[in-house]
Image (cartoon, rainbow, N blue to C red):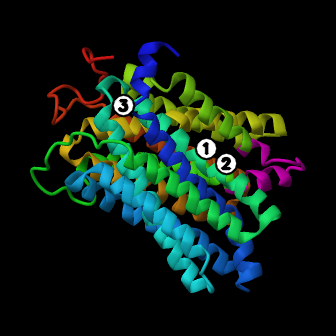
Amino acid sequence: MTGGKLLFYRPIAPLFAAIFLCLLGVGASLAVLPFYVLDELDGNRVEVGVVIAAIAVSAVIARPIAGRIGDRHGYRTVMLGGALVCAAAGAAYLVAGNVGVLVGVRVLHGIGEAAVYTAGAAWLVALAPADRRGRVVGLYGIHMWLGITLGALLGAVLLRTSGYPAVWLFAILTAAAGAALVAARPGPQQASPAGRAGLLPRSTVVPGVALSLAGFGYAALAAFVALHMAERGVENGIAAFNAFGFTYVGVRLFVGGLPDKLGAGRVAVGSALVEAVGLLLVAVAPNLLVAVLGGLVIGAGLSLLFPALALLVINRTDPAHQGAALGAFTSFWDIGLVAGAPLAGLVASVAGYPAVFQVMLLAALVSAALSAWTMLPRRSPRTNTPADLPPTSTPR
């Protein structure tokens, strides 16, 4: 890493670390809660589903609200508050003695996670030069994804070695460490909002719907690729989903600046089309090799889709309302996952597993079409230049 890059990343590295630390606790709780509901609270499988889903539902609602509050009262304040709420949720797991209380704790955890992610993303956008915003948002997402993934692994290990209290203590300590990092940083300079931003800013609608439709493919891959391959007599079909993570992280790390260089709309269209190719490979896969290849291709497509569409939203939103816009936009991803899995199940029950991936392929193509529509000539409210084009003269 060159000295210039090191100087660029030094002030924003604590924000990456903070989202990673807070999401470690989210991942740890996700890994152990199904067992906690069934074994400790004598719950049933339906209650397991409700407990797991509660955090996603609350996050969908909380993200745009957190963004609006951040626009008005400061992203540092909201991110710090969210980290403290995550720590409080970790403590609340310790005393959750029935399923009803546990659902409330999960709602609280979702509010904290939504505040941390949304305020942190808006904070990074405020700090980053225009020609690096797509890359920075993509790297921020990697730290979130790694936090959940590694947290799930550590949560399972802690449960086996030390029991549930150790998992909840881990969630408290990691969130508290994230809060300490945020508290140590000065907040960014923010434009004063001239008016109120709605919960669903206009700039988020088309990119958000495109994101939701692309998210259907991820939901289908996670839920049904193993069953799809098992029906064809292929074991270990889940390897296709595991392969997804390699290209999802790798593409962002090595070519994460493409939305900044080539234009957000162009990259979003290409990413959705790449996802569609991956879904086609999974749909027709006669063996594990082709299915794994499909998972790799899907990961490559979705890797840059989120930062590209987020950059579209950023470029079309007044700086004073970018927290609200990013919060609303991110909620579309959650909506895609929440809606995509049941839709895939319905398709599978009616037409079989290959049809699941064929339908999601069509959704990816519609996502590409919506992204192409955003490239039609229009003017950015901030720069009076076409909103999709990469900047031509910004500091590096």
Above or below residue 271? Residue 48 is below
Q: Mark 2: which secondary structure?
A: helix
Amino acid type indicated by mark 1 = Leu
Q: Furthest residue to the left?
A: 194
The residues tagged by marks 2 and 1 sit, at their Cα atoms, a distance apart of 6 Å
Residue 38: name its quadrant: bottom right
Cα separation between marks 1 and 3: 20 Å
- Residue in the image at 43% along x and 41% along y: 15
Q: In the shown orientation, is residue 274 left or right of residue 266?
A: right
Q: What label sits on residue 150 in the rendered view?
A: 2
Q: Give yes or no for residue 230 being in the magenta stretch.
A: yes
Question: What's the amino acid at mark 3?
Answer: Arg
Q: Nearer the viewer, mark 3 or mark 2?
A: 2
Which residue range is magenta in the image? 223-241
Magenta segment includes 225 = yes
Q: Give the residue number, with chain letter if any, for mark 3.
A: 133
Whichever of labels 3 and 2 marks the residue nearer the N terminus, that label is 3
**Please, what secondary structure does the residue beneath circle 1 have?**
helix
Which residue is label 1 attached to?
A: 146
> From the viewer's perspective, is 317 left or right of 237?
left
Image location of residue 301, percent across then percent down: 56, 34
Identify the secondary structure beneath mark 3.
helix
Q: Crowding near pointer 2: few (<14 within 10 Å), some, many (20+)?
A: some
Q: Is residue 303 visible?
A: yes
Q: Main secondary structure of the magenta part?
A: helix
Q: Residues within 10 Å of mark 1 (few under 14, many from 20)?
A: some
Are discs 2 and 1 less than 8 Å apart at CB?
yes
User: Height in image: 253 above or below 182?
Assistant: above
